[in-house]
Structures are given as C-alpha cells and as structure tokens.
Image (tube, helix red, strand yellow):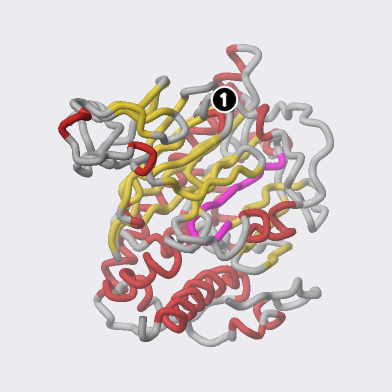
Amino acid sequence: MARFPKPPEGSWTEHYPQLGTGPVSYEDSVDPEFYEVERKAVFKRAWLNVGRVEQIPRKGSYFTKELKVANTSIIVVRTTQGEVKAYHNICRHRGNKLVWNDMPLEETSGVCRQFTCKYHAWRYDLDGNLTFVQQEGEFFDLDKSRYGLVPVHCEVWEGFIFVNFAKTPEQSLRDFLGPMITDLEGYPFEKMTSRFYYRSEVKANWKLYMDAFQEFYHAPVLHANQSPTAYSKAAAEAGFEAPHYRIEGPHRLVSTSGIRAWEMADEMRKPIEDICRSGLFGPWDKPDLGEMPKGLNPAKCDPWGLDSFQLFPNFVILFWGQGWYLTYHYWPTSHNTHIFEGTVYFPAPRTPRERIAQELAAVSFKEYGLQDANTLEATQTMVESRVLDNFVLCDQEVLIRHLHTETAAWVEDYRRKTAGV
C-alpha cells in the first residue's frame, strides 16, 4: 500500500503525485465482482472500529455487532478480569447464533455471567470457554477445552474498540493507526457521555458516501436551504475551501476554519438557534475540556471549525472546535448498499438548557446527513448506468482520490498475495 508524505503549501493534489490529477473511475463502486474481492482484501484485513468501551461499562457487559461485509456476527464483552474481548457469535455445537433476542438478525446488548445457546443450552463463560454441555455423556470423547468460542483479534485505543478478522493481523492496531491518529491521544473522549445515535440504510456504495464527507466543495450548494437565503446565496457564490488536508498511510484528514455563529448578523441565524444557543456547529457555550492534543487543528485556524479524520477503511472521527465530536461508520452490505451510522458525543449536560442545545446540534447534524444520503442514492443509480466511466475532481477533492486509490492498492496487494493459492 502506498505511503504519502505531508505536503508543503500549494496545490494539495499535485503534492501527492502518486494520486495523479486525471479523471477518477467509480467502477469500484458499481462492480459486484470488485466488491466481493474488496470484502476479503480490505474488511477482513484492516482494523475495524465496532464501538466504544462505554458500551460495556462493567464486567459481563456485552453487545453484538452484525457485520455482513465480513459475513459474520460478533460478541464484544468485558470479561471478569475487566478485559475487552471479541468472539464470533456462533455456538460450537451446531452453529446456531449464540447471542440474540427476539429477532436473530438484530443487534443486542446486555449484562450476563455466561452465554447460553438458545438451541441446546451449551454455555460459555465470558472468556469464551465452554463450561457446560447438556447431556454431556451422550457425546463421544468430548473435550470441552477444545470447543470454546472462536476469538476475534481485539484491541482498544483511546476507548475505541477495534477488531481484525485476519488469522494474523499484518500490523498492531497502533501501527495501523500511525502518528496522525495517535497524536489525538489525550482528547477527553471519556467525558463525552451524552450520546445521540442515528442509523440509516443507504442505497449507495459505502465509498460514495465517504466521499461526501471528505470535501466541503458541496456544502454551500447542497445544504443551502439549511441557512437563511441571504447567507446561503453569498456562501454559494463565494464557495468554500478547507485550509488543510493531510494524507498519512491509508488515513486522511481535512481541517477547516470555523465561524462563531453568535457573532453572525441576526438575519444570518435561525430563530431556533438564538433560542437554544446552538446549531450545526454545536452549542454556543463551549465546555472547558482542558488542553487539546497536538494532533488537532494542525492549520492553527482561529476560529477553528472542525477536523475530520478518516480512518481507513470506513470510520470517521470528526472533532468540532466548539468542544464535541461525532463518528461516522459505513458498513457495506452489497456493492451498492450500506448501513450508515452516525453518533454524536457531548459532555454530560449540567442543565436542561445544555441538554436542549445538544439536541438541536444533533438534530441539525441528522438533517445534513439525510441530505447527503439522498443525493448519493441518486449518484449511485447514474454511475451504475455507466454512461460515463470517469469523473473529474478538483484540488479540494484530493481525499476522494486517496480513498479510491488506497482501496485499489489493498485489493491489488491481496490479489498478489493470494495468486495461485
């Protein structure tokens, strides 16, 4: 896989010559055969974020995750020793899904002392050991120590839980993340306990939706109706360009300057924003989170808007200058469908006003996300027409080039390593 240095000032794309400047093909987003290889080459080899430690706050806490792209379901659990472990969600007896509630294909969570199969009551402890077999004497030379749950490689970074489905991961999680991401260590993720979660099934390839959040070229146009007319018209005419892009290994960053919403002219704001002292950029009253890690706001913008870190393949952490963050996940379900998950994190509100301000910010984010999703379903249908086979990109769409280039590199690397196997 290619590695890209940090560029000097100037045209961002031209300083990443490995990416080229010509038109880009979206065949990787419409070809079912490419998707089948991509599943193995990318999603069964890369580290995938599946949640946070706050979802399993005490011993015996667990949640399941349905990962169609890896053709499996997993259990993530906090063991009796306080460790975070992951297992394939399958009973060793007859292959029944081990943990589920009323609907076998739906995710679930809870607290337990052991996992018991609903089919024949085989039991497993939190460390995955088989501890009980119904009518054990009827089996032939059964050695329970050989039939524990199938483990999944699992590591935790800054409270984020990652799994890897390779037999032997090619890198440790920390090496996979690299300095651009590990320089975020020290951000007070653990203080962000006010959580809003959205999930949507999108009829578009996962990469096309990631592309939508890798550039702000579209923002003044697509999201114009979210702002007062005078402001939207001026923004569309002026355009928008982020001051900083960075590519490191398989990961990407776009950093933008900001705007102090409360300093805008009255006609530029919505009445609800004045009432709630909040909006798209978050609550106006910024919490004191202490010193920020060195990896944030690399362009030293003042005011600073946001940093969007795109962790390959399908995970985004987006930090807002107003003291909150959100995450995006894009989980492929076919070559032209995926599940989008958006989670917004704030510090615990201290007053009803703070709670309302957070809720307005979360709802505003949801509205913007829906606009992007609606557009990309239309994009998918027309790209699949193959009327055009490549598309031109501007300089500030450099991260889009990188995602498709990096995905192709992982697929090619996998094909080379498995040739003749």
Whether 4 is drawn above or below 20: the answer is: above
Which residue shows up at 34% across the image and 57% down it? 69
Which residue shows up at 45% across the image and 37% down it? 76
Q: Main secondary structure of the magenta part?
A: strand
Whether 128 is drawn above or below 398: the answer is: above
Whether 342 is drawn above or below 115: the answer is: below
Identify the secondary structure beneath mark 1: strand
Left or right, 274 with reference to 88: right
Q: Residues within 10 Å of mark 1 (few under 14, many from 20)?
A: some
Residue tagged by mark 1? Answer: 194
Which residue occupies the foreground of this view, 395 or 273? Answer: 395
Which residue shows up at 59% across the image and 25% down it? 193
Give the residue type that dot 1 points to. Answer: Ser
> Which of the 4 quarters of the picture holds residue 415?
bottom left
Q: Magenta segment range?
A: 311-321
Image spot of residue 13 (x, y percent): 65, 78
Which residue occupies the foreground of this view, 292 or 225? Answer: 292
Image spot of residue 412 (x, y percent): 46, 81
Q: Quadrant of the N terminus?
A: bottom right
Q: Quadrant of the C terminus?
A: bottom left
Which residue shows up at 62% across the image and 53% down it? 308
Residue 239 visible, this orientation: no
As drawn, the residue found furthest toward the top would be: 351
Residue 292 visible, this orientation: yes
Image spot of residue 113 (x, y percent): 42, 20
Is 41 included in the stretch rendered in magenta? no
Which residue occupies the foreground of this view, 228 or 175? Answer: 175
Image spot of residue 154 (x, y percent): 53, 46
